[in-house]
Amino acid sequence: MLTVQTTGFSQEKITTFILTRHAEKENDGTKDPDLTDAGKIRADQLVKLLREQSVDAIYSTDFKRTQNTVMPLAKVKNLVISRYEAFKTEAIDEIVEKHRGGTIFMCGHSNSIPWTINYLIGKEQYKDFEDSDYDNLVIITLFEKGKAAKVTWLNY
C-alpha cells in the first residue's frame, strides 16, 4: 500500500473533489434537457473510470442532465445524489466541512464547474468550458480551501 505524506497537513484533512460537467445534452429548446445517447454513454464511462475510486458523496445540480450524468455512478457506489446550488459559496463551504477528509464527486455545468474550481483553489485561474466541451474531469486535492490545493486535469 502506498502512503503519501504531505508536510504540514494530516491525511484526514485532505479532501478530494472530482468535478465534471454534465454529459452531452439534448438540444430540445428547454432549460432542462435530458442527455443524448452520446451523453448516456459518457455517463457510463464515468462508472468505468471511477469504479475502483473511493467516493464518499455525490453532488449534482437540480437538472435532468446533471442528475442523469451521475446516476450510473451513484447506483454502482450505492450513494444518494445530493443536490447543491451552483455559485453559492455557502453551499460549497458546507460540502467541504461535511466531507472533510473524504472524496466528493460533483457534477455541474460549463460555467459552474470552473467557478467551483476557482473558489476551491482561491484564485481566478480557470475559464468557462466551451459549450461543446464535455470530457473534462478535474481532481482537486484540497489541503485548505482557498490556500493550498493541487489541481489535476484529465479528459475522458
Image: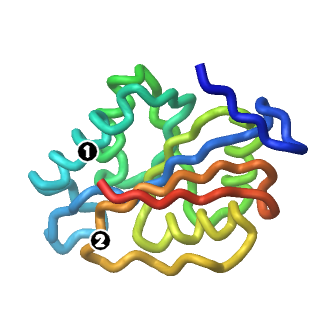
Q: Is 48 rendered above or below residue 133?
A: above
Between discs 1 and 2, the one toward the N terminus:
1
Query: Is label 1 in a helix, a strand or a loop?
Result: helix
Label 1 sits on what residue type? Answer: Ala
Q: Residue furthest front?
A: 2
Q: Which residue is mark 1?
A: 43
Q: CA distance from mark 1 to mark 2?
A: 14 Å
Amino acid type shown at disc 2:
Asp
Q: Which residue is at the front of the view, 61 or 134?
A: 134
Q: Quadrant of residue 70?
A: top left
Q: Nearer the viewer, residue 23 or 53?
A: 53
The residue at the point 78 percent across, 63 percent down is 146
Residue beneath the point at 42% across and 65% down: 109
Which coloring applies here? Answer: rainbow
Taking the spot 16% from the left edge, 64% from the top edge, the residue there is 26
Q: Is residue 28 above or below residue 95?
A: below
Q: Residues within 10 Å of mark 1 (few under 14, many from 20)?
A: many
> For the view shown, which residue lies furthest in the left direction?
37
How far across and how far down the image is residue 131, in percent?
30, 77
Horizontally, is 47 left or right of 85 in the view?
A: left
Q: Is residue 79 left or right of residue 14?
A: left
Residue 150 pos. (x, y %)? 65, 57
Q: Nearer the viewer, residue 99 or 67?
A: 99
Q: Position of residue 7 (x, y in %)?
A: 86, 43
Q: Up-down: is 11 above or below 43?
A: above
Please tell me whether mark 2 sits on a helix, a strand or a loop.
Answer: loop
Q: Quadrant of the C terminus?
A: bottom left
Q: Residue at x 78, y 30 (%)?
A: 12
> Which residue lies under the disc numbered 2?
133
